[in-house]
Image (cartoon, helix red, strand yellow):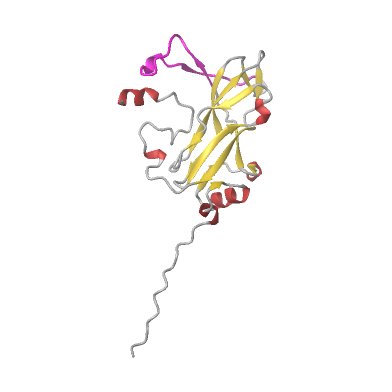
């Protein structure tokens, strides 16, 4: 009688625990994603890791959006100008009432195809009448090659100027594990995945394409 040969053992590919569980990454998972290279961030400050998010700081450049007439989204020549805002004598960023300011994060970010992010302002700023937002979604593969800043839109809803301090916490980046992206963001046309500074809108390229 021919002995029955045992079936060969197939070695299963080990999936990091934080990726096996879908949903928001908590502090432990954020640190693991960073140490494993799925999350790249420069400079990295471990004290900015929060229970379910990573805080990001305000960069040292800022630009005011200034219009000179109606804006036609298909005509780049009508777009608002980016006027550099110089800091005041104490190094603060002055945001005037009703002003719209674009500013980069101090950190440059790189996400793998297995991570997606969501940027949100903090309640500390919201309680002062300041909104910090632009596009909340940070797509899989954002900044994966050369890293990229996240551009923030800062609006002062008060009747008096607001003084902000570059280098201080300005927003939170929530991270979610995903099943992976077939087309990473950096491979899409007219993306912002390699920007190291604030750039003007590329919407006209998309409108003209359609």
Which quarter of the rendered picture does the N terminus lie within? bottom left
Residue 8 % position (x, y): 39, 74
Q: Residue at x 54, y 50 (%)?
A: 33
Residue at the left extreme of this rendering: 209
**Residue reaching furthest front?**
1
Name the residue nearer the viewer: 120 or 45.
120
| Residue 42 visible from this viewpoint | no
Where does residue 83 sit, x and y in percent of width and height? 50, 17
Vertical order, 173 against 60 (above or below): below
Residue drawn at x 48%, y 43% is: 111
Question: In the picture provided, is 39 more to the left or to the right than 6?
Answer: right
Position of residue 137 measured from the top left corner of the image (x, y, whole percent): 50, 35
- Please tell me whether residue 146 is drawn above or below residue 168 in the rendered image: below
The quadrant of the rendering that contains the C terminus is top left
Hey, which quadrant is residue 141 in on the image? top left
Q: Is residue 48 visible?
A: yes
Q: Find the magenta span and give its range.
A: 63-88
Q: Is residue 83 magenta?
A: yes
- Tell me the quarter of the picture where residue 124 sits: top right
């Amino acid at each position: 009688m021919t002995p029955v040969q045992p079936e060969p053992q197939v070695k299963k590919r080990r999936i990091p625990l934080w990726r096996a569980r879908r949903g928001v990454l908590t502090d432990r998972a954020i640190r693991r994603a960073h140490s494993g290279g799925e999350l790249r961030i420069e400079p990295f400050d471990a004290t900015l890791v929060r229970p379910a998010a990573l805080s990001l700081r305000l960069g040292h450049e800022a630009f005011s959006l200034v219009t000179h007439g109606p804006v036609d989204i298909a005509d780049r020549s009508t777009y608002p100008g980016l006027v550099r805002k110089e800091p005041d004598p104490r190094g603060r960023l002055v945001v005037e009432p009703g002003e719209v300011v674009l500013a980069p994060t101090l950190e440059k970010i790189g996400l793998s195809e297995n991570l997606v992010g969501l940027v949100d302002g903090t309640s500390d700023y919201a309680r002062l009448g300041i909104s910090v937002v632009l596009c909340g979604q940070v797509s899989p593969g954002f900044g994966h090659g050369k890293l990229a800043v996240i551009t923030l839109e800062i609006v002062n809803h008060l009747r008096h100027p607001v003084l902000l301090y570059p280098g201080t916490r300005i927003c939170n980046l929530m991270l979610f594990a995903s099943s992976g992206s077939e087309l990473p963001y950096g491979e899409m046309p007219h993306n912002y995945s390699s920007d190291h500074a604030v750039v003007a809108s590329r919407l006209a390229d998309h409108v003209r394409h359609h």
